[in-house]
Image (cartoon, rainbow, N blue to C red):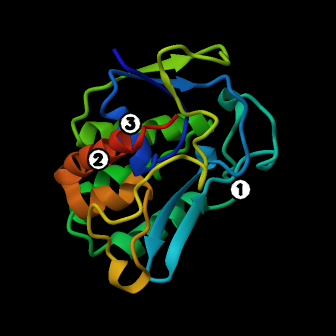
């Protein structure tokens, strides 16, 4: 059994899914502390003008040092409408947008009190659509070290996670204009490739394994 230990992140990127689909169990750590400048409340897509960061506002601001299970979303900003409007604008003409849009949009029509609840819902939705089989577990208490596991909690940050993917494994909507952006949110791959996303993630995982995994 191979286990992935992960932070809660919304719409994890392709690197995350490439690891997860090859694991038997994904353990989400709800006891770790929130880290600013990480994927824990943000995800990235690409549009006509380049990279787009979509951030989820938090109560008490992004500098809080609370356990993840205590971090709450701030709804004083209309972030859900803004995120979905951006996604629709960017991916509305993608091959599989109409197929997946109802499922993804529904996530923005609910008010999740905690950040981890929204993040978990995004993972579960994509997992179901792609028919992935890994089990999910939640770590109630913080554990610094895990043995015989792939632990990405500390290295899973924009620009920090190790990945050799620099060239395209699939066609991005604005690739001819902006070049290929590696390791975007799973939304980019999902709307572009649909059910074939799992095959692309397998290619990604094969390259990671050949390159040396995530030491």
Residue matched to label 3? 19
Mark 3 is surrounded, within 10 Å at the Cα level, by few (under 14), some (14 to 19) or many (20 or more) other residues, namely many
Residue 149 in percent (x, y) is at: 48, 20
Residue sitting at 55 percent across and 46 percent down?
161
In this view of the protein, can residue 101 be seen by the observer? no
Marks 3 and 1, the one that precedes in the sequence: 3
**Residue 201 bears which disc, if any?**
2
Residue 178: x and y, percent? Answer: 43, 81
Residue at screen point 81% across, 46% down: 63
Instruction: Between label 2 and label 1, give the one nearer the viewer.
Output: 2
Say above or below: 99 vs 120: below
Q: CA distance from mark 3 to mark 2?
A: 8 Å
Seen in the image, is 30 located left or right of residue 27?
right
**Contact (Cβ within 8 Å) of mark 2 with mark 1:** no
Q: In the figure, residue 18 lies in which quadrant? A: top left
- Label 1 secondary element: loop
Residue at 25% x, 43% y: name it.
Answer: 202
Numbered label attached to residue 76: 1
Q: Dot 3: what SS?
A: helix
Q: Are marks 3 and 1 in contact (CB under 8 Å)?
A: no
Q: Quadrant of residue 20?
A: top left
Tag 2: Cα neighbours inside 10 Å, few (<14), some, or many (≥20)? Answer: many
Residue 43 in view in this figure? yes
In this image, 143 relative to 65: left or right?
Answer: left
Mark 2 / mark 1, whichever is N-terminal: 1
Q: Label 1: how many residues lie within 10 Å, few (<14), some (14-19) or many (20+)?
A: few
Q: CA distance from mark 3 to mark 1?
A: 35 Å
| Alpha carbons under labels 2 and 1: distance apart | 36 Å
């Amino acid at each position: 059994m191979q286990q992935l230990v992960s932070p809660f992140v919304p719409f994890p990127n392709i690197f995350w899914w490439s690891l997860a689909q090859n694991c038997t169990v994904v353990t989400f750590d709800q006891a770790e502390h929130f880290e600013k400048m990480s994927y824990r409340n943000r995800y990235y897509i690409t549009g006509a003008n380049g990279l787009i960061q979509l951030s989820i506002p938090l109560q008490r601001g992004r500098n809080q040092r609370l356990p993840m299970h205590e971090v709450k979303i701030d709804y004083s900003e209309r972030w859900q409408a803004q995120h979905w409007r951006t996604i629709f604008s960017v991916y509305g003409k993608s091959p599989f947008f109409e197929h997946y849009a109802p499922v993804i949009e529904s996530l923005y029509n609910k008010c999740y009190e905690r950040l981890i609840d929204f993040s978990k819902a995004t993972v579960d939705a994509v997992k179901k659509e792609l028919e992935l089989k890994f089990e999910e577990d939640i770590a109630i208490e913080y554990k610094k070290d895990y043995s015989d596991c792939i632990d990405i909690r500390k290295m899973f940050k924009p620009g920090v996670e190790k990945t050799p993917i620099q060239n395209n494994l699939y066609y991005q909507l604005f690739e001819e204009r902006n070049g290929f952006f590696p390791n975007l949110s799973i939304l980019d791959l999902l709307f572009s490739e649909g059910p074939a996303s799992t095959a692309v993630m397998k290619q990604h995982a094969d390259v990671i394994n050949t390159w040396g995994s995530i030491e």
